[in-house]
Image (spheres, rainbow, N blue to C red):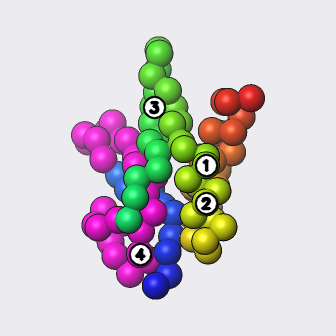
Amino acid sequence: MAVVIRLARTGAKHEPRYRITVADSRRYATGKFLEVIGHYNPLASGQDKKVVLDMAKYEEWTKKGAQPTDRVKHVAKLAQSSTN
């Protein structure tokens, strides 16, 4: 089973929000997933957080062989920079 870490879109029209999910690569992006490890809100304003990501789970899944997409890699960098 090929496991990927990818974004699954939620939210309303013109107000995107994403879940950072670990899923089988053969499933649809919004289909079944193994685990939700975070959230990404590209239009965050005020006190809303742009990225909430459990870095321990992210590292655990990548060590197990899960392949993050390019966008998820970018979001992970944002999460690391916001915690430092």
- From mark 1 to mark 3, how far is it between C-alphas? 25 Å
The disc, 1 or 3, on the residue closer to the chain's N-terminal end is 3
**Residue at horizontal 35 percent and vertical 65 percent from the top:** 33
Residue 32 lies in the magenta-colored region: yes
Q: Nearer the viewer, residue 20 or 43?
A: 20
What crowding class fits label 2: few (fewer than 14 Cα within 10 Å), some (14-19), or many (20 or more)?
few
Q: Mark 2–mark 1 contact, CB under 8 Å? A: yes
Residue 80: image quadrant is top right
Vertical placement of 1 versus 38: above or below?
Answer: below
Residue that lies at the very extreme toward the right in this rendered image: 84
**Residue at horizontal 36 percent and vertical 41 percent from the top:** 16
User: Residue under circle 4?
Assistant: 24
Q: Mark 1–mark 4 contact, CB under 8 Å? A: no
Q: Which mark is residue 60?
A: 2
For the magenta stretch, what is the residue range? 10-33
Image check: 33 left or right of 61? left
- From mark 3 to mark 2, how far is it between C-alphas? 28 Å
What crowding class fits label 4: few (fewer than 14 Cα within 10 Å), some (14-19), or many (20 or more)?
some
User: Residue under circle 1?
Assistant: 56
Residue that lies at the very extreme toward the top in this rendered image: 46
Local SS, label 1: helix
What crowding class fits label 1: few (fewer than 14 Cα within 10 Å), some (14-19), or many (20 or more)?
few
